[in-house]
Amino acid sequence: MTISTTKKLLGATVAAGVVFALAGCGQAPTDKPAGSGEPVDSDFLPCLVSDAGGWNDKSFNQSAKEGMDSAADELGIKPLEFESANDNDYAPNLETAVSEGCSLIVSVGFKLSAATVESALANPEIDYAIIDDWADNDFDGNVDAPNIKPLVFDTAQAAYLGGYAAAAWSAQSGVNKVGTFGGMQIPSVAVFMDGYQLGVEKYNEDKSASVQVFGWDEATQKGSFTGGFDANDTAKQTAQGVLDQGVDVILPVGGPVYQSAAAAIADSGKDTLMLGVDSDLAVADPSVADITLVSIMKAIDVAVKDATVAAAKGEFDPEPYVGTLENEGVKLSGFGDFESQLPEGLMDELKTLQEQIVSGDIKVESPNSP
């Protein structure tokens, strides 16, 4: 299997209205796992290793755990789940998973890439999957071990819809300024920001508007980043720096950093809204539902569940899975209570945009896409 070297380290529903489905190549997520009801290996033991964000990050770690737990419930087995407290835990957790007899080991996030490749090469009889990474640590365009399945997502497609919606909201308010910032500057983070800006530009083109984007420049690939994924003072200051530009919608990309954005919004005393990432943030963390306009989602849970069920049946396929709008691997959540406040016609416009992206009439071209 070959992959572009530029894709190395690819990262990071409430409303009754339209829900925008998303996901691409490889095995597509399904509501019912492939082969459901068919016999599985009685000795099958799936395992999951988090990154330092932990299981309660309201984002991709939590989503991966939900997918693993769902698969285990359906299979009638108990998985082993290893929560990493810091980066130094990755290799030891993988070693423990191997020693415990795990049949499938799923690593959550690009930070586990090197340790996952090392473990997979040393244990060719074990199946591996890794989220938001191509497992190409030598940059030769190939997955570094034949027993690793990358689970990656073309999030720019869903973020394009989110950017369009953010621009519409800001134009309606008369502010005409939106912003974004990220955790670490890696493809799985920047891909959100690329799609977001491109969606704003599409709104400006369609409506002859002039909504500005602060915190990211897709052309130069430069913007505002915290340097990590912790909800700390640095993240709050980074969020504040974007808010100081006068934006009334902000997209924080990087798991728990949304908490710092929410704190900065609260301190500002303004009616700024934010967008969630990975999971439906208004559902995952109801405490911020009143300031979450919409979320740009990745079906990490479904991808993990499907890979786990397939491995349990002895049908593990290392072909990379790429989530897109077409195969429902990425999507826009509902707008919750904000739906009634949206500009007239916006929901129909978003539906049309999604259809055009799926058909190929609109190509969302991010240098950070898989």
Image: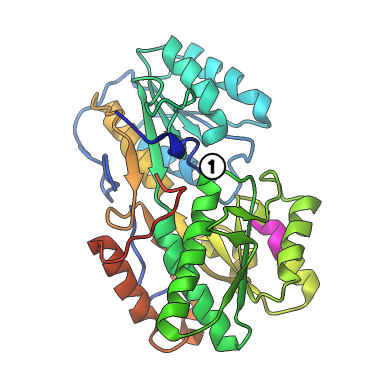
Q: Residue at x 66, y 29 (%)?
A: 87
- Corner quadrant of residue 363: bottom left
**Residues in magenta, as a range:** 258-262
Residue 332 image offset from top left, x and y in percent:
42, 64
Q: Residue at x 23, y 27 (%)?
A: 315
Q: Is residue 219 visible?
A: yes
Residue 91 image offset from top left, x and y in percent:
58, 20
1 over 247 or under it: above or below: above
118 over 277 or under it: above or below: above
Helix, strand or loop at label 1? It is helix
Residue 197 image offset from top left, x and y in percent:
51, 65
Q: Is residue 279 visible?
A: no
Q: Indicate left or right for 149 with 263 as reference.
A: left
- Corner quadrant of residue 134: top left
If the image is split into quadrants, where does the N terminus sit? top left
Is 361 included in the stretch rendered in magenta? no
If the image is split into quadrants, where does the C terminus sit? top left
Q: Which residue is mark 1?
A: 61
In front of the other: 145 or 176 = 176
Is 260 included in the stretch rendered in magenta? yes
Crowd around label 1: few <14 · some 14–19 · many ≥20 (10 Å): many
Q: Residue at x 59, y 87 (%)?
A: 173
